[in-house]
Each structure stands twice: as structure tokens, then as C-alpha cells.
Image (spheres, grey):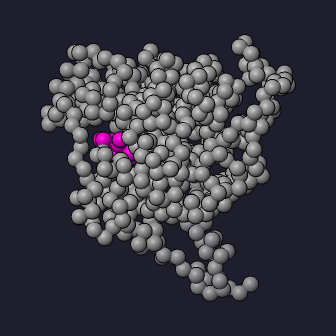
Amino acid sequence: MTNDTETIASVMSRGGRPANSRREIKIIDTTLRDGHQSIWATRMRTEHIEQLAADFDAVGYEHVDLVAPIQFDVAVRYLKEDPWERVRRAHELAPNTKFRALIRSRNIAAFDFLPDDVIMAWVERLYANGFRVIGSFDGLNDIDNIAPGLRRAKELGAETFGAVSFCESPVHTDELFVSKAQELIEKADVDRIMLKDAGGLLTPERIRSLVPALKAVMGGRPLEVHTHSLTGLAPLVCLEAAEAGADSLHLSVAPLAAGNGQPSVQNVVRDLRALGYTVKLDDAKIGEISNKIRTIAETEDKPLGEPVEYNGMHFMHQTPGGMLSNFRSQLATAGLGDRYEELLVEIARVRSELAYPIMITPFAQFVGTQAAMNVSIGERYKIVPNEIKKYVLGYYGELLAEIDPELRQKIIDNGASDIPLEPSEPEPMLDDLAAQYPDEPIEFHLLRAMFAGDQVDEMKKTVAEGGNPDEIPMPLLGIVKALYENGRPGVNSLTAGDLHINILKGEN
């Protein structure tokens, strides 16, 4: 091990290798979940996973992260795919892989809390559809919001993990995070703890203090470290986490790594081995996965993950990368493109005024929306979104600090008048949905509980018609090329919605 004054960087720069650093570090792959979520706006389709599943099955990962709520959201609303079928196909094609599912508190894919019957059924259907590793996180680290679902997953026989969600603020101390880990163990008896740094805010200095503090209260349970490369520090954070005692690291296969995503498995594993750690992965298979992803990206004009420069301002606003690009676009559309930096400063101010919510879904969206309204309107908190009023009233859980009484009252006064001052438990939903849609499986009832209007019906219709014409697998030239190369002599056809393509192929 490096000593207290010696960093990974100094060891590697002089070619050193700590003699006693020979334990195994396990890798949890995030490519199929957070990798494409961060780099491709969650646009990986089921057919992509089908192409990659067998290779993932042979790599030797401890777990492979497959779904969180947004994978269901994007599949239903944009890709028009059945997300449950994706889950079943992945388990079928990679039978030796431990796929994992992540649950977002009591909202899952909605913003408002869902009733307990939906939460419990969601856990049960994850297990019924193959998941044997199930975990949960809450944006306020309110463990009471996630403990019941975690207990149910464990009763079913799943390995469970609870997330300690990280951020930087005066109230988010190592002592607070340690107390939340203890709560997860006491209230849910989780099998593992995940240190979840969705904002990419961890630094080498902080990880050196936080990992040993967490490990000291975990009773031998594995500690996972999940971070993002938004400040360029994440690869070093992962190495320092291993040095400090972390058991598993969350990494993604390049090119769905770096930038907004996790560090790349190729680079971090190389450096872990150089430091003397054992990492049991099939590098050749990882290379094959990387090549296939690059081919998909090239064929479908999708972006690649690229390293970013250090940006100290990120520690002020702590906004996830995907939201930053959306804000820049929205401000430009509104003719306010020159006020982007002002918006970032306002996000930091709003977050501090609202008791430092962690900038992960849904609270990043809440804070960002309020800040954007403050900047565009010119008067702070003149208009208050429903979610901000519900937040200060405690609808989403217990706040970690007090909100200034005058500001709190202004938010209440300027928010919607029909929001009760006292939150109440939502009414059960599944019996009514089952009566309304008696021929559907419960998986679709769960989707209907989260997606308003006719979005589930549109998804079902598109699946029945053979696919989404707005999500054609390749640009037109690629389609023609594929039809020609894979077709038989004669006329070959492709139909997707109103699109019909015929190509004549002669004899070879």
C-alpha cells in the first residue's frame, strides 16, 4: 500500500509497485446502463444488447449493470421498445452474468412518489424477470424511502446493495455518509454498499478518507465505488479507492466511457495491474466489445466518450453533464445563450438555499428548473414549480438542513395553491390498473403507473408493427448497404412504419 503521504500518481510516475498490493479488485461493468445513458442519451436499443450480450457473458465481470428507471423511460417514450423484453433477452443471451437493477427511491421513473403496491411489485417483477442483484438509491439519502424495497428484494433471494449518494456541501460530511451506510445495514440488511457519485465530485483526497470510514462500519460487506469523469479526476479516484480498501469499481468499456460517463475499464484495469492488483477479466473479449460499440457508433452517427479537462466550477453547481448540454441548448433557443455562466452560478445558489439536495434525478432537475426560471424571469422564485414546493414541504423525504424561513414561505406562497401543506401517502394503483387492462401482464400495469397518457399504448402498437421508424438502426446509406450485403439475389425489402425500401441484388 502507499503510505499516507504517497499518492498513486507518485508511485506510478517512478515505476514503483507496492509489494503487498496483491488482492483482487472486482469490476462492475456499467456499459449497458450508465455508459450509454451518459454518452448516447440512453439510446442503446435492445438489438445492440443482443449483439453484445454473449461477449459480456465471457468477460468475467463481477456484475453487469443493465437497468435503472431511465432505461425503462427511454425505451417506452422514445425507442418504443418493450423494456421488459429487453431484460428477458439479456438474461437469455448471457446466462452466466449477474445483471443488476437499480431502483430510484419511491418514484422509480416518475417524479412524484408512487404507492407501496407499485414499489413492491416493481421489485418482485425485477426478480421474476431474472435479476438476482437489486439495489436502490435516494436523492436525499433518506433510507426510510428505500429500505422496504430492499428488504423485499432480499426476501425474494436477491443480493442487495444500498447506495450512499455522494455530493459536496457543508452538511455532506464523512460522518453523515457513514451514518447513512449504517442505516442501510440496520434497516435493510443490505449485502453491499455502493458509494454513488453521480456528479463526478469525488477527489483523490476525499476518497482516501471516505473509503476507510465506510469500510470500518460495514462488517466485511463489499464496498463499490461509482463515479463519473466530469472533472477528469475519476480514473485516479478509482485507483485511490482501491488503495483505500474498496472492493469493486464501476467502469465502462471505451468508447462508452470518459466524459460524462465512468472511467474506461481498459485504462483503469491496466493501471490496477501495474500497481500489483489482481483483476480477472478477459481483455480480448473487452476489446471485441469495444470494437462492436465503435462500429455501432460509426454506423449510426453516435458520439464517443472523450476525456474532459478539469473544471473547478463543476464543484459549485454540481450539475450532471447531460443536463448542462440541455440547458445550453434551451437558453440558446430562448435567445439567452449569453447567460449560460449566469445560470450555472444561479444553480449553485439555489442548491445552497434549498438545503443542498444531491444533484441527481429528480433533484438535479428540480434545482435546475428553478434556477432557469429565476434567470429567465429576472425575479427569483416569482414562479415556483410544483416539485420545488413539494420538496420544501417534505414530500420527497427529510431535508438535511433548514431552509431560510422567509424563502420557505415565499416558495409556499408562489407555488400551486392546490398542493396540500402536509404530504399524504399515495393511493394504491395496481388493482384499478388490472381492472382497466385485464388482458395485460402486471409488467405493463407497472409501466402505466409511471407513464401518463397513451405512451404505453404507443409503445405496444409500435412493437406490434415491427419497430420505431424514428429509430432506424442506421442512416439510409447504411440500410441500403445492409440490405445489399445480407440480401439474396432478387428484390430485397425493408418496411418500417411508412418507410418502404426495395433493392435489387443480382447474382454473384
- Name the quadrant containing residue 18: top right
Residue 368 in view here:
no
Residue in view at x 22 percent, y 58 percent: 432
| Image quarter in which the C terminus is found | bottom right
**x%, y% of residue 147?**
40, 37
Residue in view at x 54 percent, y 31 percent: 195
Give whichever of 477, 373 is nearer the camera.
373
Q: Is residue 132 left or right of residue 265?
A: left
> Magenta span: helix, strand or loop, mainly?
loop
**x%, y% of residue 355?**
35, 20
Give whichever of 41, 242 is nearer the camera.
242
Residue at far top of view: 5
Magenta segment includes 405? no
Q: Is residue 314 above or below residue 425?
A: above
**x%, y% of residue 472?**
51, 64
Residue 191 in view here:
yes
Q: Is residue 21 left or right of residue 309?
A: right
Q: Which residues are magenta?
A: 105-113
| Image quarter in which the N terminus is found | top right
**x%, y% of residue 471?**
48, 61
Residue in view at x 31 percent, y 46 percent: 116
- Name the quadrant containing residue 183: top left
Q: Is residue 280 left or right of residue 312?
A: right
- Name the quadrant containing residue 140: top left
- Badge count: 0
Q: Is residue 407 above or below residue 80?
A: above
Magenta segment includes 107? yes
Residue in view at x 75 percent, y 19 percent: 2
